[in-house]
């Protein structure tokens, strides 16, 4: 096994990728400009690669498949971490085949695989195990989402990984965690959305529980995993020791539901399904305008609720004792919805939005993806950006998640083809000879 290698902010086998979009903060929060002066030499104005992000120097091995684990690695890569995506030589990450494709190229992967180098490696093969341990010796983080016991079966459990690299953070993402009666069951985000209480709360009062039509639990878990990894890396600074992150997808969803466990514990309260309404405030719903558009209105505070009711010509509600609290207004949601919905139904979309803005009341359009892509606020924020791509030319996708004023994140390239960087990583990072890589390929290990 090779000794751990230094981890500079960028590595020679990543420099040939596209340097695409570095997400900048709004102009008023940026550092002083370093734009070239009129006397600068011509080369000073040439495009350059994005500055290293705040996680530059971290190396992440992404062994996970589908969504929660890989998205956590994407979030780290967006802010400068070097992410090496490990896939089976003959069974790529299934996310490459999820959803629509163009010219045989999976589009979801372009987003999920961005800023990652793609390497093939059969971890169940002894030679594949050895190569993975060599890679782990150079890394800071390994992210995996196999069923509990799978890494151990391959000789790649926490003990073996820690022996190769005592400072390694191993993030283990599973449906139900590493122990307990459900631990060995197959687990997906859909089951977490059901078990956590989310589905029981979602839907119309007289309808069935509703599941989201997208990977909600996986996405929430990915955000949590990225946070957990950073917490573990911060802990490593004290003594240089890595640790294991055990993250069950059912837990982040339970957390985002808020106070429901406390309400039940202290009051025996079980919130029923309320459709678009809130049990804690009103008016809060979607309303249709005279020209057929849908708008969402939220009045979580009494002051905003008062502005809405005065705007729609019903100030008498404001004087009612029950109007002062969110729960009081929620008990009168039928009356408030009738007042707000009736007024909105008599006006066109643009009239309603303009009137709400003048009144400083909260309103937003209900957007499908067509409207999102054309929305002026998203355009102002740069929330959707264009990424050059060798396979598709240009791909528009979500930008990095937030703006940093000094060390912004960047999308350096979109998801790469299966195994595209295998030779470059194994030779450039581990120093494997062309002959050894050819032998591994002949044996089906890469």
Image (cartoon, grey):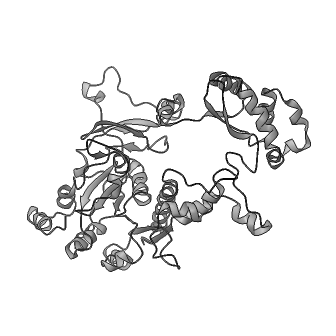
Give the residue drawn at x 60%, y 63%. Answer: 196
**Residue 344 shown left or right of residue 255 in the figure:** right
Within the image, what quadrant is residue 408 found in? Answer: top left
Residue 100: percent from the left, percent from the top? Answer: 36, 45
Q: Specify whether residue 304 is in view.
A: no
Give the residue drawn at x 35%, y 60%. Answer: 60
| Vertical relation: 131 (above or below) 70 | below
| Vertical relation: 25 (above or below) 262 | above
Give the residue drawn at x 30%, y 77%. Answer: 154
Residue 149: percent from the left, percent from the top? Answer: 39, 78
Within the image, what quadrant is residue 348 found in? Answer: top right
Residue 307: percent from the left, percent from the top? Answer: 78, 31
Closest to the observer, 128 or 138: 128
Give the residue drawn at x 22%, y 62%. Answer: 89
Within the image, what quadrant is residue 390 found in? Answer: top left
| Vertical relation: 101 (above or below) 199 | above
Count of marks overlaid on the render: 0
Q: Specify whether residue 444 is in view.
A: yes
Direction left: furthest residue: 435
**Residue 119 shown left or right of residue 246 in the figure:** left
Q: Quadrant of the C terminus?
A: bottom left
**Residue 2 shown left or right of residue 108 in the figure:** left
């Amino acid at each position: 096994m090779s000794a751990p290698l230094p981890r500079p902010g960028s590595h020679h086998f990543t420099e040939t990728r596209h340097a695409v979009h570095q997400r900048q903060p709004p102009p008023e929060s940026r550092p002083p400009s370093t734009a070239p002066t009129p006397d600068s030499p011509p080369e000073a104005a040439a495009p350059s690669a994005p500055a290293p992000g705040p996680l530059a120097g971290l190396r992440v091995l992404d062994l996970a498949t589908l969504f929660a684990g890989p998205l956590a690695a994407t979030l780290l890569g967006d802010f400068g971490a070097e992410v090496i995506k490990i896939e089976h030589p003959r069974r790529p990450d299934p996310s490459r085949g999820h959803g629509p494709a163009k010219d045989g190229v999976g589009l979801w992967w372009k987003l999920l695989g961005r800023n990652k180098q793609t390497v093939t490696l059969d971890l169940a093969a002894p030679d594949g195990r050895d190569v993975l341990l060599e890679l782990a010796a150079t890394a800071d983080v390994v992210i995996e989402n196999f069923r509990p016991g799978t890494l151990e079966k391959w000789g790649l459990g926490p003990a073996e990984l820690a022996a190769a690299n005592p400072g390694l953070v191993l993030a283990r993402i599973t449906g139900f965690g590493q122990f307990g009666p459900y631990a060995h069951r197959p687990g997906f985000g859909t089951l977490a959305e059901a078990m956590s209480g989310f589905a029981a709360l979602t839907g119309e009062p007289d309808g069935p529980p509703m599941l989201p039509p997208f990977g909600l639990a996986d996405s929430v878990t990915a955000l949590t995993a990225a946070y957990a990894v950073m917490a573990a890396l911060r802990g490593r600074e004290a003594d240089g020791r890595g640790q294991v992150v055990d993250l069950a997808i059912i837990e982040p969803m339970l957390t985002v539901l808020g106070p429901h466990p406390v309400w039940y514990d202290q009051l025996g309260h079980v919130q029923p399904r309320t459709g678009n309404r809130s049990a804690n405030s009103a008016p809060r719903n979607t309303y249709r305008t005279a020209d057929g558009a849908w708008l969402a209105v939220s009045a979580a505070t009494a002051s905003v609720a008062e502005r809405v009711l005065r705007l729609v010509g019903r100030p008498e509600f404001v004087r009612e004792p029950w109007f002062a609290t969110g729960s009081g207004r929620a008990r009168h949601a039928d009356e408030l919805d009738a007042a707000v919905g009736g007024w909105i139904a008599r006006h066109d979309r643009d009239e309603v939005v303009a009137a709400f803005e003048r009144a400083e009341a909260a309103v937003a359009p209900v957007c499908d993806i067509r409207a999102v892509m054309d929305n002026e606020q998203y355009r102002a924020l740069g929330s959707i950006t264009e990424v050059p791509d060798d396979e598709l030319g240009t791909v528009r996708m979500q930008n990095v998640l937030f703006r940093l004023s000094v060390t912004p994140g960047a999308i350096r390239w979109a998801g790469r083809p299966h195994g595209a960087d295998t030779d470059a990583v194994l030779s450039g990072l581990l120093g494997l000879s062309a002959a050894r890589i050819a032998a591994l390929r002949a044996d089906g290990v890469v």
